[in-house]
Structures are given as C-alpha cells and as structure tokens.
Amino acid sequence: MPLVKTKQTRKTRKQVPRMKITFTRKVHEYDDVYSFFFDATGVKYRAGQYTHLRVGGALDFFLGSIRELSFASAPGDPELMFSMHVGSKSKFKEKMSALQPNDKISLFGTGAHIKLPESRPASLVFIAGGVGMTPFRSMILEAHKAGNYPMTLVQVQRGDFLYRKELKPLVSDYNAVRPEAFVDTVKNVARGRSDDVIFYVCGSSRLIASVVEALNEAGVEKDSIQIENYK
Ligand SMILES: Cc1cc2nc3c(=O)[nH]c(=O)nc-3n(C[C@H](O)[C@H](O)[C@H](O)COP(=O)(O)OP(=O)(O)OC[C@H]3O[C@@H](n4cnc5c(N)ncnc54)[C@H](O)[C@@H]3O)c2cc1C
C-alpha cells in the first residue's frame, strides 16, 4: 500500500533512518509471483517483521514507489528475500521488475505486527494464502533453527503453493488446501488444541476475517491469534 503524503508521513520520513540495499537476483515462483534478493549486510530484522522498500529517485515518492513488504528471509541469511506479485503493473512493481544486479534501492521503517514467542508454546499454527506466506517462511525457518517447535501450516491457494517444497519438511503438520476446503480445514486444525497455541494469520482483509471467524467458532481465544493484514 503506498504511503500517503501527510504531515505525519513527512515527519516520520525525516526521523526514520534509510539504508541502501543492493539487488542480487530474482527467482520466478509461480504465475506473476517473484522473489527478489538483496545483500543482507548491515540489515537488522526479526523473523515475521515487515519493512518499507523504495525503488527509484526522490520524485518517485509521490508516484507510488514505496511499498510495505514482509521479510521472507530469516535473520542471518546472507540475502534478504521479498516475494510479491508483479502483475499489477504499478510503478513500484515495474521498477522492481526492471532491477539489475548491483542496483541499489532504499529500505526503511522496519516494524512488527507478529512475532515468535520468547518462551516455547505448545505449538505454532500458521495460516495464510498466496504471498501471505512471506513472513511465515521467515518465522518457520527461524523456529526450525531454534529446534523442536511443533508447527502446523495451513496454506490456501487456487494454483501453486508458495515455498511448499521448502517448508513442508520443516513443519509437523502440513495442509495445502483449495479455497473450498479452507474454512473447514482451519476449524479442524483449531479444534481440541490446548490454550498454549499461537495462531498466526496473514493475507488480505477478506482472508483474515474468514479465518478469525472460523477460529472463534472452533473456540480459539482472541488473545491466541496474531494477525498480519496486507489490506
Ligand atoms: C505489513 C505489510 C506487509 C506486506 N507484505 C507483503 C509481501 O510480503 N508481499 C506482497 O506481495 N505484498 C505485501 N504487502 C502488500 C504490499 O504492500 C502491496 O500493497 C501489494 O504488493 C500491492 O502492491 P501493488 O503495487 O502491486 O499494487 P497497488 O498499486 O498498491 O494497488 C493495490 C491493489 O489495489 C488495486 N488498485 C490499485 N489502484 C487501483 C484503482 N485505481 N482502482 C482499483 N483498484 C486499484 C491493484 O490492482 C492492487 O490489487 C504487505 C502489506 C503490508 C501492510
């Protein structure tokens, strides 16, 4: 979502340190979804965080060349990874698609809406659709490194499942479902869980609303749900 030019935004821009990151390569995932990689040197972030990327010159700020993106890479990886659809043909996506190795773009305003727990819960349940998987790739890789987190992943998609090959072996319970079976799968996964489970949900407002409703119906408390809303 483009940043709106407001007094608050202008003030924030002055205060937020920006850094340049160097593009290394891109990988085609499926359809119009690509992963973009950058040298991670000097970039600090936690699994599950998002940041702002700006591609283009100063004037581009007003032409919609800033977007919020979740880190798909895990802290400590040599490259930063961001995955996104490029088919919208927005200015930002066109500029991202045109990047060549060694080109530099800006990164700033890293924040968090979701995070891994500090102490070990009974299990972690990740529920996402499409590119909503990006923060979960980072979190699953990080939790796997820490070892022995029981993890469940519910991924909904009409076509290919993003990161499937890579993440399936890392979780104890992997569910790749079509939209028709999604809500029932979410309810089945949620029913009968202990209180000490964290449910993470990421995607569009529509997906989030249907998942939260299904979790509530399955008896999951609001406090056990962490949400990343791509709006
Ligand atoms: C915290 C956070 C993390 C995010 N992480 C990711 C991520 O990891 N990967 C990712 O892909 N996205 C992520 N997003 C969403 C991302 O910021 C962009 O909003 C998204 O990628 C769409 O950008 P765009 O430039 O393609 O489309 P935009 O130009 O931003 O448009 C957004 C949508 O509105 C539609 N639209 C635009 N203009 C019009 C118009 N005039 N009339 C009707 N419809 C219109 C477009 O078709 C598009 O579907 C995240 C968002 C947030 C808030």
Image (cartoon, grey):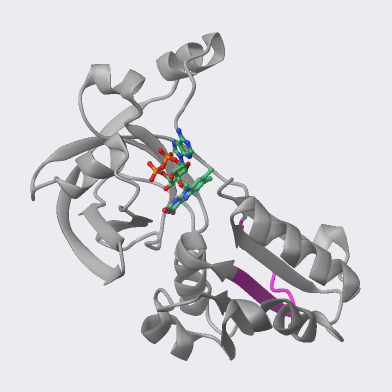
Residue in the picture at 39% in, 59% down: 75
Q: Residue 89: where, in percent of width, then height?
A: 29, 44
Residue 69 vs residue 144, the one in the foreground: 69
Residue 6 vs residue 90, the one in the foreground: 90
Residue 142 in view: yes
Q: Residue furthest top?
A: 7
How many tags in the picture? 0
Q: Residue 214: where, in percent of width, then height?
A: 81, 71
Taking the image as shown, residue 158 lies to the left or right of residue 105, namely right
Residue 80 vs residue 60, the one in the foreground: 60
- Tell me the quarter of the picture where residue 195 sits: bottom right
Which part of the image, by quadrant, shows the C terminus? top right
- Tell me the quarter of the picture where residue 166 sits: bottom left
Q: Residue 49: where, in percent of width, then height?
A: 50, 50
Taking the image as shown, residue 230 lies to the left or right of residue 162, namely right
Residue in the picture at 85% in, 81% down: 194
Above-or-below relation of 189 to 135: below
* Magenta region includes residue 43: no
* Magenta region includes residue 116: yes
- Tell me the quarter of the picture where residue 206 sits: bottom right
Q: Residue 33: where, in percent of width, then height?
A: 32, 63
Residue in the picture at 53% in, 8% down: 7
Q: Main secondary structure of the magenta part?
A: loop
Residue range corresponding to the magenta coloring:
115-127
Which image quarter has ligand 1? Answer: top left
Residue in the picture at 88% in, 64% down: 221
Residue 118 in view: no
